[in-house]
Amino acid sequence: MLVKLLPDQVSEHWDEISLAIRQALPPFVANSDRSMVNILKAILGGDMQCWILYSSDGAGGSIYAVMTTKVEIDEISNTKCLLIYSFYASKPLTNQLVISGFETLKKFASSEGCHKIIAYTNIPKMERLWESLGGVTITRFLEMEV
């Protein structure tokens, strides 16, 4: 199941959460302490969301992944999309866990007025996972140092 963490839960577990986020930052974001402070501020201020992909079992459960999201608004068209800002899996994911997690994410995106969920990746396995969920790869991200 996908669970949205409350700000106090993020604060309490920030050391572990920040390690996961650092592993999966978007390609255009500096992997720096300043970036991580800004991400924490955004989560605590409600501008970003932090989620865990969790599976319960008889021993209490296990965390499989940490994800952050942000509602992005294209100011020209006033179009809202939910951006998966980072996604880091610490354990192999089952299809059932991923499918149920994305159903939760779709409901959240819809409740926020978003018409799409979007993400960046350079990991072929994540691209295949995305496509198995009904997503498509429709563009390439271009980058140039200045």
Image (cartoon, grey):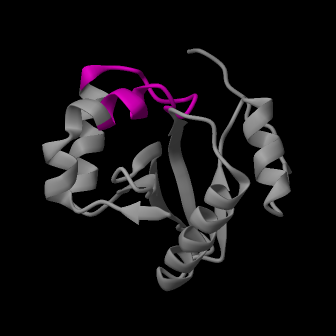
Q: Going by the picture, which residue comes out furthest to the top?
A: 145
Residue 131 in the image, given as x and y percentages of width and height: 84, 53
* Along the viewing direction, whichever of 85 and 65 lies nearer the viewer: 65
- Say if 84 sits above or below 111 in the image: above
* Along the viewing direction, whichever of 146 and 61 lies nearer the viewer: 61
With 82 as the anchor, is 36 left or right in this view?
A: left
* Along the viewing direction, whichever of 127 and 39 lies nearer the viewer: 127
Q: Residue at x 49, y 76 (%)?
A: 108
- The magenta segment is 17-33
Residue 106 in the image, given as x and y percentages of width and height: 60, 73
Residue 77 in the image, given as x and y percentages of width and height: 63, 74
Q: Residue at x 86, y 51 (%)?
A: 138
Q: Residue at x 77, y 47 (%)?
A: 129
Q: Residue at x 77, y 34 (%)?
A: 125
* Along the viewing direction, whichever of 45 and 104 lies nearer the viewer: 104
Q: Going by the picture, which residue comes out furthest to the front?
A: 58
